[in-house]
């Protein structure tokens, strides 16, 4: 471990703001990139289910 | 050997086959991405030594360099996939190319943003108009252009063709990015990893970086497959196998 304490780790030798800003934004964007296709697939499945129901009603 | 490759190439061209095989690959690439990214982040943030000049702001390297490498690799992949789609009219290749763009744009933005945040404490400026930074900004605009073209046509085929041509032309920018730190005077430091020489930094510093680069590649592969599968579901929704798949759940 490079740091002596947790506060030391957060502080990053005075560069904490820069380091955490960079890591925070990157993590957020990676998560968004993963969540978007997951949500898209759910939406496609929902549309298909709706379509099937409609077809069954008209029959 | 060549016959086998040709056979594989043809099977990859079948949306159904592509959908099935990537369904099996995604969990592995996804798990590898999570493991490599977690290990690399903890290693880089808490265990790697600090830089004797830059102090702890140097730790931004562990996301900045992988994102910058990916930004360029993805553009290259997008151009190749687009080219294959253009020449052999392979639908899956078009869909792969289409799926590359938003991930590549994200990586370029991450590289630019983390670079700015790293530049402030190191160079004293968020941004300088030097060759490396400017050519990366152009890469971001090229990605935006490709994304815009993708939705500018009613026909998916014309959209794929137009964005493939822009990607292929835009590839010129990739060697410019790479050699910008050698051709022009710059504040930016030279490449961390090269194929021919040992890294200038000690092992404790570059090993976590390598872990992060692998993690970023696995992440890209996972999201690329997820996006391409959605494209397949959307475009092949009139086929029986897709209707069967979608109504199962």
Image (cartoon, helix red, strand yellow):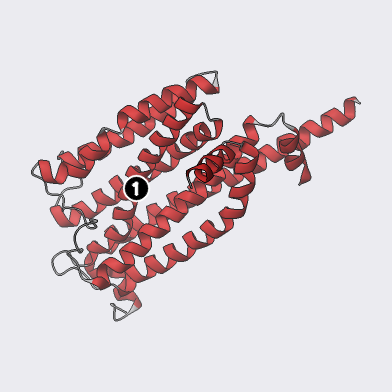
From what the image shows, is residue B51 above or below residue B146? below
Q: Residues within 10 Å of mark 1 (few under 14, many from 20)?
A: many
From what the image shows, is residue B112 above or below residue B30? above
Q: Is residue B2 left or right of residue B68?
A: right
Q: Is residue B1 left or right of residue B143?
A: right
**Identity of the residue drawn at 26% across and 32% down:** B172
Question: Residue B13: where, in percent of width, then height?
Answer: 57, 36
On the question of residue A36 being in view, the answer is no
From what the image shows, is residue B11 above or below residue B141? below
Question: Residue B91: where, in percent of width, then height?
Answer: 55, 30
Q: Quadrant of residue B81?
A: top left
Chain letter belonging to callout 1:
B
Instruction: Please tell me which residue lies in front, B93 or B101.
Output: B93
Q: Secondary structure at mark 1?
A: helix
Question: Residue B224: where, in percent of width, then height?
Answer: 50, 45
**Identity of the residue drawn at 84% across and 28% down:** A55
Question: Residue B238: where, in percent of width, then height?
Answer: 72, 28
On the question of residue B205 being in view, the answer is yes
Instruction: Please tell me which residue lies in front, B249 or A43.
Output: B249
Q: Give the residue furthest to the bottom.
A: A4
Q: Is residue B44 left or right of residue B89?
A: left
Q: Give the residue furthest to the left.
A: B185
Where is mark 1, residue-wise? B110
């Amino acid at each position: 471990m490079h740091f002596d304490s947790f506060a030391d780790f957060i502080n990053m030798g005075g560069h904490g703001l820069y380091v955490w800003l960079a890591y925070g934004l990157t993590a957020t964007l990676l998560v968004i990139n993963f969540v978007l296709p997951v949500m898209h697939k759910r939406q496609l499945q929902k549309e298909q289910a709706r379509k099937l129901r409609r077809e069954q009603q008209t029959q | 050997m060549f016959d086998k490759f040709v056979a594989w190439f043809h099977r990859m061209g079948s949306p159904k086959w592509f959908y099935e095989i990537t369904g099996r690959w995604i969990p592995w690439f996804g798990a590898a991405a999570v493991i490599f990214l977690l290990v690399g982040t903890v290693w880089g943030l808490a265990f790697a030594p600090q830089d004797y000049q830059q102090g702890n702001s140097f730790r931004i390297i562990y996301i900045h360099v992988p994102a910058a490498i990916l930004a360029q690799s993805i553009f290259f992949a997008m151009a190749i996939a687009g080219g294959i789609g253009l020449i052999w009219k392979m639908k899956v290749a078009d869909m792969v190319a289409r799926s590359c763009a938003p991930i590549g744009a994200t990586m370029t933005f991450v590289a630019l943003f983390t670079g700015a945040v790293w530049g402030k404490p190191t160079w004293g400026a968020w941004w300088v108009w030097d060759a490396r930074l400017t050519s990366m900004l152009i890469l971001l605009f090229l990605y935006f252009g490709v994304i815009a073209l993708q939705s500018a046509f009613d026909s998916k085929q014309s959209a794929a063709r137009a964005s493939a041509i822009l990607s292929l032309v835009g590839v010129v920018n990739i060697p410019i990015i790479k050699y910008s730190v050698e051709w022009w005077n710059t504040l930016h430091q030279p490449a961390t990893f090269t194929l021919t020489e040992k890294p200038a930094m000690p092992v404790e510093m570059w090993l976590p970086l390598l872990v992060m680069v692998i993690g970023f590649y696995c992440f890209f592969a996972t999201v690329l497959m997820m996006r391409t599968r959605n494209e397949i579901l959307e475009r092949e929704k009139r086929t029986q196998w897709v209707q069967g798949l979608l109504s199962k759940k």
